[in-house]
């Protein structure tokens, strides 16, 4: 039963991410800004750092591919980026500390890297015409704000859960 806890949590967060925008009232956010929940990516990064690096990378690949299939027109972008950025966060955590604040900050940097890589791919294939300044203003800053709030609420409980699962494994 315990081996199904992480896949169930990740599946729930995957589904919750897509319905988050519909559940939250539009009045809270500015209409011109784009708030992108990257809750699934944050949890994958936490799994990679605090639980099991290979397992986190596998979850990154699986849910990245699932994200590509469900939400994007190009297969492989999120498959590659979720796995790569989670790996880089894991690598950086070995050099720095596995302090929850450091890992949360690395997750936010990873989200920025993820967003800019997706923006670069969309710019290269011609599906966006936003300037970098406008992209940073209407997408990066609101996304960082939203995911920072998520990290403030869920980082500590998820770290504790992963620690408990790691001990029991």
Image (cartoon, rainbow, N blue to C red):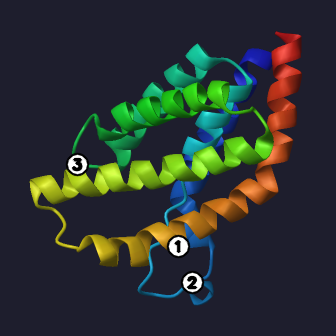
Q: Reading the chain from its start, which is encountered first: label 1 or label 3?
A: 3
10 Å crowding of disc 1: few (<14), some (14-19), many (20+): some
Q: Reading the chain from its start, which is encountered first: label 2 or label 3?
A: 2
Write down the quadrant of residue 6 in the picture: top right
Q: Report x, y in % for residue 152.
A: 78, 58
Left or right position of 154 against 39: right
Q: Mark 2 against mark 3, which lies toward the viewer?
A: 2
Mark 1 vs mark 3, CA separation in Å: 24 Å
Mark 2 vs mark 1, CA separation in Å: 9 Å
Secondary structure at numbered mark 2: loop
Nearest the camera: 102 or 70? 102
For the question of whether residue 1 can be seen, the reply is: no
Q: Mark 1 against mark 3, which lies toward the viewer?
A: 1
Residue at figure coordinates x 51%, y 46% from the top left: 110
For the question of whether residue 57 can be seen, the reply is: yes
Write down the quadrant of residue 93 in the picture: top right
Mark 2 vs mark 3, CA separation in Å: 27 Å
Kindly identify which residue carries mark 1: 142
Q: Reading the chain from its start, which is encountered first: label 2 or label 1?
A: 2
Q: Mark 2 against mark 1, which lies toward the viewer?
A: 1
Number of numbered labels in the structure image = 3
- The reply to whether dot 2 and dot 1 touch (C-beta < 8 Å) is yes
Q: Which mark is residue 29?
A: 2
Kindly identify which residue carries mark 3: 73
Residue at figure coordinates x 46%, y 27% from the top left: 62
Residue at figure coordinates x 28%, y 34% from the top left: 76
Residue at the outermost front position: 95
């Amino acid at each position: 039963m315990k081996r199904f806890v992480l896949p169930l949590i990740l599946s729930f967060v995957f589904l919750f991410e897509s319905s988050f925008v519909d559940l939250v009232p539009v009045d809270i956010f500015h209409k011109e800004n784009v708030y992108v929940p990257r809750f699934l990516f944050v949890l994958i990064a936490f799994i990679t750092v605090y639980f099991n690096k290979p397992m986190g990378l596998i979850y990154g690949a699986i849910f990245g591919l699932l994200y590509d299939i469900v939400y994007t027109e190009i297969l492989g972008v999120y498959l590659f980026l979720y796995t790569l950025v989670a790996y880089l966060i894991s690598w950086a955590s070995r050099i720095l500390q596995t302090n929850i604040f450091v890992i949360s900050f690395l997750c936010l940097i990873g989200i920025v890297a993820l967003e800019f890589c997706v923006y670069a791919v969309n710019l290269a294939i011609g599906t966006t015409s936003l300037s970098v300044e406008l992209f940073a203003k209407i997408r990066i800053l609101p996304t960082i704000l939203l995911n920072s709030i998520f990290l403030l609420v869920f980082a500590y409980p998820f770290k504790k859960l992963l620690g408990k699962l790691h001990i029991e494994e």
